[in-house]
C-alpha cells in the first residue's frame, strides 16, 4: 500500500516558540517569526475559489494577496478548502511578495502532491516552488526559467530526474538532481532555506534543500547551492507552480526563525518544528 503524507495543516514554527527562543537568547531578528502561512481553507472541491487575489491564512504579516498566472487560458490555480490545485496543461505560477533583509535565514516549505498523470510526453512536467521574481513570472508563468533564483522542481515520470533544485534561472549557478523514486511520485514536503549576506548590495547567498521523505536530503544533511549577488538582488517573492502536470500544493509556510531557534538546526531541533509537523499515515 502506498504511503501517504497527512494533509491536515499544522503549524510549522509557532510564534510562541519563536518568541520563547528570543527571550532565552536575549536577541532579536528584524523579520523573525512566520511571514506567511496558508492552509488554503477557501472554496470547496465542488466550488473552488481562485488563488489569484486571495489572502494567505491563517498568517499574513505582509497584508499581501496571491498573484496567479497561467499560459493555458481558462485554467488557473484554485483552492479547494485544503489545497491549491494546479492545472495539468500549460504553465502556472502563484506568488506572494517578499522583501529580503540582510543577515537573515528564510525557511520556505510546502507539501507537493503530484497528480496521477502528465499531459506532456516529452518528460517536461513538474510541480515546483522557489524564491523568485514577480515581473518575470507574471510574463512567463514559469518558476523554472522565468525569474526563479532559488527553486526546486519535482517530477513524476520515469527516465528523468524526479527532483531538481537549482540556483539561478535554468540552474545557471548550479544545482542538484536526484531520481530516488519511480512513478507515481509520492506526496512530499520540501524545504528551501535561503540565507542572506550582511551586505545585500554586494554579497551572495547560500541555499539548501531537504524534504520529509529524504529523497533530496535531510535536515542534518541537506543539499547546497549558492546565489551570486546579481541573482539574489532579483528575488522579491516566494512562488509555487506547475508545468504540464496537475497536482496540489498545501501547507505553504515562510518563516524567519529567531537566532536561538535557528541555533537548534545542528541538533535537529528545528527539524522537529519544521519537518516533524507532518504525520505519515499508511
Image: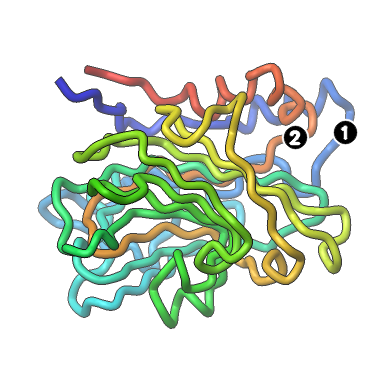
Q: Of 12 and 152, which appears nearest the observer?
A: 152
Secondary structure category for the residue under label 1: loop
Q: Classify residue 88 as left or right of residue 105.
A: left
Quarter containing the C terminus: top left
Q: Classify residue 262 as left or right of residue 133.
A: right
* Residue 82 in view in this figure: no
Quadrant housing residue 24 = top right
Vertical order, 113 against 77 (above or below): above
Q: Residue at x 50, y 27 (%)?
A: 275
Vertical order, 3 against 154 (above or below): above
Q: Which residue is mark 1?
A: 27
| Label 2 Cα crowd, 10 Å radius (few <14 / some 14-19 / many 20+) | many
Q: Residue at x 48, y 22 (%)?
A: 276
Vertical order, 278 against 114 (above or below): above
Q: List x then y, in percent, for residue 72.
A: 22, 76
* Residue 18 in view in this figure: yes
The circle on residue 186 is none
Q: Residue at x 26, y 39 (%)?
A: 185
Q: List x then y, in percent, for residue 263.
A: 76, 26
Label 1–label 2 contact, CB within 8 A: yes
Amino acid at each position: 500500500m502506498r504511503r501517504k503524507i497527512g494533509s491536515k495543516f499544522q503549524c510549522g514554527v509557532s510564534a510562541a516558540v519563536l518568541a520563547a527562543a528570543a527571550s532565552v537568547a536575549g536577541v532579536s531578528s528584524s523579520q523573525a517569526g512566520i511571514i506567511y502561512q496558508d492552509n488554503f481553507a477557501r472554496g470547496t472541491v465542488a466550488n473552488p475559489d481562485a488563488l489569484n487575489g486571495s489572502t494567505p491564512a491563517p498568517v499574513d504579516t505582509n497584508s499581501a494577496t496571491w498573484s496567479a498566472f497561467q499560459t493555458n487560458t481558462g485554467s488557473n490555480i484554485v483552492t479547494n478548502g485544503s489545497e491549491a490545485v494546479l492545472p495539468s496543461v500549460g504553465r502556472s505560477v502563484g506568488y506572494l511578495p517578499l522583501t529580503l533583509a540582510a543577515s537573515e535565514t528564510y525557511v520556505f516549505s510546502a507539501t507537493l502532491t503530484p497528480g496521477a498523470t502528465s499531459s506532456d510526453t516529452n518528460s517536461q512536467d513538474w510541480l515546483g516552488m522557489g524564491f523568485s521574481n514577480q515581473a518575470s513570472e507574471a510574463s512567463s508563468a514559469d518558476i523554472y526559467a522565468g525569474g526563479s533564483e532559488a527553486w526546486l522542481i519535482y517530477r513524476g515520470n520515469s527516465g528523468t530526474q524526479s527532483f531538481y533544485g537549482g540556483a539561478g534561472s535554468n540552474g545557471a549557478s548550479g544545482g542538484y538532481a536526484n531520481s530516488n523514486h519511480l512513478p507515481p511520485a509520492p506526496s512530499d514536503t520540501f524545504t528551501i532555506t535561503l540565507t542572506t549576506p550582511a551586505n545585500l548590495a554586494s554579497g551572495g547567498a547560500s541555499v539548501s534543500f531537504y524534504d520529509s521523505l529524504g529523497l533530496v536530503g535531510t535536515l542534518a544533511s541537506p543539499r547546497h547551492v549558492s546565489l551570486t549577488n546579481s541573482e539574489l538582488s532579483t528575488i522579491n517573492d516566494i512562488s509555487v507552480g506547475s508545468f504540464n502536470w496537475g497536482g496540489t500544493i498545501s501547507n505553504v509556510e515562510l518563516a524567519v526563525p529567531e537566532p536561538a531557534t535557528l541555533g537548534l538546526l545542528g541538533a535537529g531541533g528545528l527539524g522537529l518544528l519544521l519537518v516533524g509537523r507532518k504525520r505519515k499515515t499508511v
